[in-house]
Image (cartoon, rainbow, N blue to C red):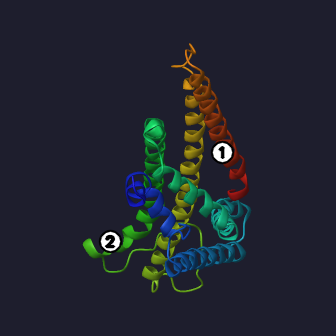
Amino acid sequence: MDKATVEKKYMKIIKTCGTLCGIWPEQNKFSKYAMRSFIYIFASTSLFTQVANLVYFYSIDLLTWQLCFMVVVIGILVKQGNYVINSKQPSCFLGYTLVRQVNITLENSCLFTTQTRCVNSLVDQFTGFGFSCATLSFVEPSLMPIILDVILPKNESRDIVYCFPAYYMIDDRKYRTLISIHMVCTCYGIYYVFAGCDANYMFIVQHACGQLAVAGYRFKNAVSDLSNVKHPSDVDKIYERVLHSIRGQQRAMKFVLKLPDGFL
């Protein structure tokens, strides 16, 4: 398989999420910096409005409720920052994974295909569930008053529904649409950072598991058809296969041991 086929068949969702949060290795610089700036601006301003809400209307109950949302926003800033600071390591992992998928041999294709299908199913469920939760729990309540004002208008506009506790220090009725757009963009930005970073990590871990599975398969079948040595050349074949299996195992272990250095 060529590179484009591998990306389309096995990495479509991962590439989409990674591109939207600015961490895809082959993403052009303008798009990468634009998406990163988008995430930082909306996350930082969201954090500012939450701190303002806590300062202006401080109470123990509000503090307990507000911390849940603030931790999430701080979490994406840390996670995104980790990817930017250590951008070479995740890029190397993804690039290596892609090259290995392209150069996969027919002997190992069944094992890699099985592993990839499993992780693709897991990634689909993970991203789909996350997108549904982000839309139904946060985005939909914020946009519903605006939609209802268009479909079933009243004498006055409906009150704004906040996705998270925040204080914008402006007239929320007059600037209701802008506030809602800011909140919606913040929610989707948070979703794509978590989905993009974690989906990439899941795929890379799956590839490491696939390499270990292939190494185990090679060890298991290294001498299965040469158990009864009938010719001196059979011994050379056994040594060659065992050596090939050991090198594959070493390569897989080296890949696995490097994973903690590039991800939170």
In this rendering, is residue 54 above or below 214? Answer: below
In terms of sequence position, does the residue under pointer 1 or pointer 2 come before the other? 2
Q: Amino acid at mark 1?
A: Arg
How far is the residue under mark 1 from the one under mark 2? 55 Å
Front: mark 1 or 2: 1
Determine whether the residue tagged by mark 2 lies in a helix, strand or loop.
helix
Tell me where residue 186 appears, x and y as whole percent. Answer: 53, 71
| Residue holding disc 2 | 147
Foreground residue among 43 and 174: 43
Determine whether the residue tagged by mark 1 lies in a helix, strand or loop.
helix
Picture quarter with the C terminus: bottom right
Tell me where residue 62 appears, x and y as whole percent. Answer: 67, 64
Residue plotted at (56% across, 49% down): 202
Residue plotted at (53% across, 79% down): 29
On the question of residue 225 being in view, the answer is yes
The mark found on residue 192 in the picture is none
| Residue holding disc 1 | 251
On the question of residue 152 being in view, the answer is no
Tell me where residue 10 appears, x and y as whole percent. Answer: 42, 51
Q: Is residue 247 left or right of residue 23?
A: right
In this rendering, is residue 109 above or below 34? Answer: above
Q: Amino acid at mark 2?
A: Ile
In this rendering, is residue 181 above or below 87? Answer: below
Q: How many marks?
A: 2
